Amino acid sequence: MNLPAKALRATPWTKGIDGPTGKQPTEKIGHSGIPTRIGPARLGRFGGWVTVRCPPEFAPVISEAGGMWDPGARQWCVHPRRVNQVLRELLRHQDSSGPD
């Protein structure tokens, strides 16, 4: 099978390949540009919501952004238009705590 050279080249978004910065590539949720993990938090999608699983110290930030706690799934559900506020706080926490 002959593949074009472009298809064989690794890109920074290829899973498991280090990008040009030497860091592991960030997986994204669909086409939304939301990362699947920021520090201790795991993000995902459920219907039209962005789901966030994180330590309880982030509960005030998520509830301020209009997040709703789903006790059955033990995760927060945040409307996609309001998730940027949560992402900024998670990134701020990750930057202050250093690399994983």
Image: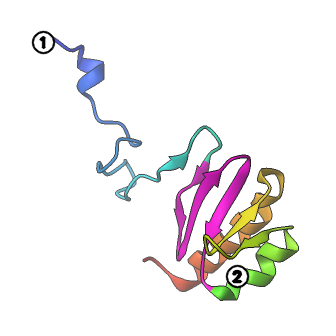
Who comes first in sequence, dot 2 or dot 1? 1
The part of the image, by quadrant, that contains residue 96 is: bottom right
Identify the residue shown where x is 29% and y is 22%: 7
Q: Is residue 81 left or right of residue 27?
A: right
> x%, y% of residue 41?
57, 72
Q: Give above or below for 58 relative to 3.
A: below
Position of the C terminus by quadrant: bottom left
**Judging from the image, what secondary structure is the residue with disc 2 in?**
helix
Type of the residue with mark 1? Met
Q: Is residue 57 left or right of residue 18?
A: right
**Judging from the image, what secondary structure is the residue with disc 1 in?**
loop
Q: Is residue 9 magenta?
A: no
Q: Residue tagged by mark 2?
A: 58
Q: CA distance from mark 2 to mark 1?
A: 50 Å
Q: Which mark is residue 12?
A: none
Position of the N terminus by quadrant: top left
Extent of the magenta region: 34-55
Identify the residue shown where x is 77% and y is 73%: 62
* Number of disc labels: 2
Identify the residue shown where x is 83% and y is 58%: 82
Q: Give above or below for 82 relative to 2.
A: below
